[in-house]
Amino acid sequence: MVGGTIDLAGIYTAYEGSDRPVLKNVSTSIASGEFVVVGGPNGAGKTTFLESINGMLPITHGQARVCGLDVTSHGYAVRRRVGYVIQNFAFDPLAPFTVRHVVMMGRYGLLGYGKQPGEDDRQAVDEAIHLLGIEDLEERPIGKLSGGQQQKVLIAQNLAKNPDILLLDEPFSNLDLCTRDFISEVLTGIADAGCTVVMVSHAFDALPTREIRILVMNDGHLSLDTCCPADEVEERVRTHSGGPHA
Amino acid sequence: MLEFLIPNNIVCHAVEAMLFASIACSVLGVIITHLNISSIGFTMTHAAFAGAAVGIFFGLDGTIAAILASLTIAAILGPLSEKARMSTDTILGVLFGMMMAIAIFFIAYMQYLGAGFNASALLFGNVTSLYREEIYALAVISVAAVLFVLIFFKEITAIIFDRRIAEAAGIRVRPIYYALLFMIAISVSLSLNIIGGLLLYVWLVTPAAIAYQFCTTVRGLFLSAPLVAGSVSVAGAWIGFQYSLPVGPLTAVAFSALFLMAVMISPKRRVPTGT
Ligand SMILES: Nc1ncnc2c1ncn2[C@@H]1O[C@H](COP(=O)(O)OP(=O)(O)OP(=O)(O)O)[C@@H](O)[C@H]1O
Ligand SMILES: [Mg+2]
């Protein structure tokens, strides 16, 4: 993990088949190794923000550079260096995939066509599985695990990739309190190792005790972009998330 | 190719054709059933069927017309299926009906006109009068389907697992998806003459569905589906000739019976018994 930068200059992102952009004129610059928490109400565009960074959604205006690469023209290359733990997943209980297989998939984009995983890949997978403490689940079918266990597998999958940037979309939503603290420690560890972490979250009780960059989204805009200590994050997000509950 | 095993030339060609068609269709079928795009496979097979009927009516090559029609449907459905919107299902239903209507109209009209047109081959398949080139073409597409899976095995398994996760991992999902649709179009069109437009779909989904009842790994699925499809098809061709039964329909019935048996004895459907 060498850490990667994110530079967004006035980006607009729209879903296919819709002419109204969801992200509107979003600009920010995230340095290598920062720990970023993205907050904001439901439907504000947080998931859209993450998928604009890794190029899964088309940017219609503006420019996004990630790890120095233009996201629109180098989407695949960007996604090989950027991990992304998705928010809503649902796996068929009968799906023929073991946990180890799923973690290995994190390496697939890095391997060329027709190449089988080698020693390096197996080692990276072992390390990721060890880091998340899911050795005992390795040979279980992923569809038959609990939501929290699946969440850990997906985090391990993205760590196996040794990403420069790790995007996480509400990684705590399926986790119990102890596991939240544990995952938070894991994320702190990889951030300390230099990986840029961008996490959408509403669980502010499990943030690493270090300076945190907070971005608050509201209706497709960034309404707050600042740095603060972990224990002030919740209050800052609360006061800047518009809407009736603010 | 198998003359050294089967001395009778007609039976030999029938066995070869059934073997290659079943391998190509069942290997692609594993991907189709796991991507939940069975209805696209369904519509594409019937587009090939309609294309062939129209092609023959206008005095063109039935296979080429089938490939063109099936590819056209793939080009229309590809972008739609990627979005997986609610309405896709209805669109597929309408397109399927349209393809059937076109096929049946031209077949009925050609029969009315006479002109020595044999509708049953197009409907139920015909394995008794195959050209050598047809068998070679089927051999090529079955090898191509197997190579496609071998070369893109990692990518295909990841896409089967979850499209968005595969995409996030940096896999080129879209090109592989379109390559898949292209391979389906060619495979079903070449198999049309042997299996027939009404039954083609059985080869595309049933072997994969049978394999799914027993396999717990993706590798197992890709190995057992063509194995099941190949052996049932070869047996079907052989028995059909021995007892003068229609080969395509006989094999399709055998597949369906096997599927029912598989569901009944499948370890995956075993209900836990309380003790
Ligand atoms: N596939 C889609 N097609 C069209 N519009 C979409 C799609 N997905 C999301 N949107 C719209 O984009 C906006 C932002 O959605 P997004 O998923 O980014 O919100 P979010 O901040 O992640 O919300 P949540 O906290 O509920 O996860 C919403 O208004 C939503 O209606
Ligand atoms: Mg979201």
Image: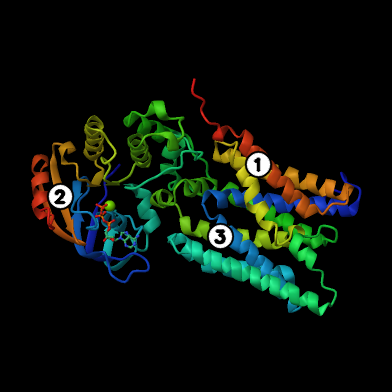
Q: Amino acid at mark 1?
A: Leu
Q: Nearer the viewer, residue B23 or A203?
A: A203
Q: CA distance from mark 2 to mark 3?
A: 45 Å
**Is tag 1's residue or tag 3's residue first in the polypeptide sequence?**
3
Quadrant hosting residue A230? top left
Q: Is mark 2 within 8 Å of ligand 1?
A: no
The percent coordinates of residue B206 (x first, y second) are: 64, 48
Question: Which numbered dot is residue B260?
Answer: 1
Residue A231, placed above or below residue B15: above
Judge left or right: residue A209 versus residue B158: left
* Same chain for the residues under marks 2 and 1 in the image: no
* Same chain for the residues under marks 2 and 3 in the image: no
Q: CA distance from mark 2 to mark 1?
A: 57 Å
Question: Which numbered dot is residue A214?
Answer: 2
Q: Is residue B171 visible?
A: yes
Residue A208, placed above or below residue A84: above
The residue carrying pointer 2 sits among few (fewer than 14), some (14 to 19) or many (20 or more) residues within 10 Å by Cα, namely many
Q: Which residue is mark 3?
A: B40
What is the residue that sits farthest to the front in this orientation? B275
Mark closer to the observer (2, 1)? 1
Q: Amino acid at mark 3?
A: Ile
The residue carrying pointer 3 sits among few (fewer than 14), some (14 to 19) or many (20 or more) residues within 10 Å by Cα, namely many
What is the residue that sits farthest to the right in this orientation? B7
The percent coordinates of residue A11 (x first, y second) are: 25, 65
Q: Amino acid at mark 2?
A: Ile
Judging from the image, mark 1 belongs to the subunit labelled B
The N terminus of chain A - image quarter: top left
Residue B33, placed above or below residue A153: below
What is the residue that sits farthest to the top in this orientation? B275
Q: Nearer the viewer, residue A176 or A159?
A: A176
